[in-house]
Amino acid sequence: MILINASKSIDLFLEKLASDIREANDGDDFIAVDTEFIRENLETPLLCLVQIATSNTVFIIDPVKVDLSFLKPIFEDEKLLKVFHACSQDIEILGIYGINVTNLYDTQLYEMLLSTSDRISYQDIVKKYLDKTLDKNCSTSNWLNRPLSKKQLLYSEEDVLHLRDVYKEQLASLKKINRHNWLRDEMSAFCEKNAPSTPPSDDKKAQLFNQLSEWRSNKAIEYNVDVQSIARNSLLNDICRKGVSFVRSMRNSRWMMSNTRKEFLKFAEQLTENMEIVKKPPVRNLSVYLLRVILEIKSVESNISPSIIATTSELEKLSDGNYDVKCLHGWRMEIFGNYALSFLRGELSMSIKDSKVVLE
């Protein structure tokens, strides 16, 4: 384990990381990544540690002690694979620190192609593949305390060490059933929170988005902070979509800097007061429930989590005759899409046999 907690140790990290990747055996030239952070009662999550493991070394990087800008080229290197478990919060927080992530692999997401479980925990996935029981007593410890305790350092080291082994075991299982490439094109979706947000296509909403963005940029300069600290990109898009009632519900939002929250909401409310958001009343469509039954059946048969095959939103679109959905493409079409279309065309029926729902 190498602790990076001073500027003078950054060069050592960069040299050792490059050497480890260059000299790694085939299939070992990737990094495993984890973070420790605090977000409770904070306007913006606070990153406390970044752990990176190569085939030879575990690096514990201390953001409290060093500027993390040296990590940008590593995480943005499209040739270098980064392995996470449940990466959404990790890449969100790295994005707040100006670090975008490319070419990533999420063991939690890929596990959904190997079982019907929805969101397997890190402890459970380590137990499944490595038959090891993790001690998670440090997971809620105070990661801002300095110096870090030996127990905290060992805990943070263990997470990325096991993650490397889990990835290799999981990848072997996926290759056996030829599913290892099924989600490759979708992993980039986990990086959207880091990427610059695009304005809505509607002209009126795009104008609103631009006005909010300009106000946010000016305040970021005034307070010398990142624009995401003033108001998240996703929040701006939500305001454009939902209008003034949404703005009025955001009085205590954690996605805005406390110093500017009241002023920002007042500005946003003025802009959105005359903006009409037409909401369609919910319509109960029973075909959605039947599509969900088909989805559950095919999920069990294929041993794949239903939520990764099709979402409720996609089922609703299908039932309304909108076929521009992900579940009608690629491997999802074979597993579920063909059956859904057959049902909607009246070519598929359900019956009960031996206390089980079967498709005919």
Image (cartoon, helix red, strand yellow):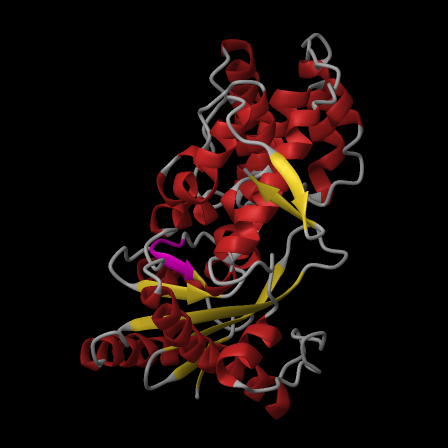
Residue at (56%, 15%) from the top-left corner?
205
Judged left or right of residue 307, residue 51 is left
Instruction: Write down the quadrant of residue 285 in the picture.
Output: top right
Which portion, as a residue range, is magenta? 101-105
Q: Is residue 330 above or below residue 347?
A: below
Magenta span has 104?
Answer: yes
The N terminus, quarter of image: bottom left
Residue 64 x/y as whole percent: 56, 70
Residue 291 x/y as whole percent: 60, 34
- In-front residue for pair 115/261: 115
The C terminus, quarter of image: top right
Residue 282 x/y as whole percent: 74, 20
Magenta span has 39?
Answer: no
Judged left or right of residue 16, residue 257 is right
Q: Is residue 33 above or below residue 72?
A: below
Residue at (19%, 76%) from the top-left corner?
22
Magenta stretch mostly in which secondary structure?
A: loop
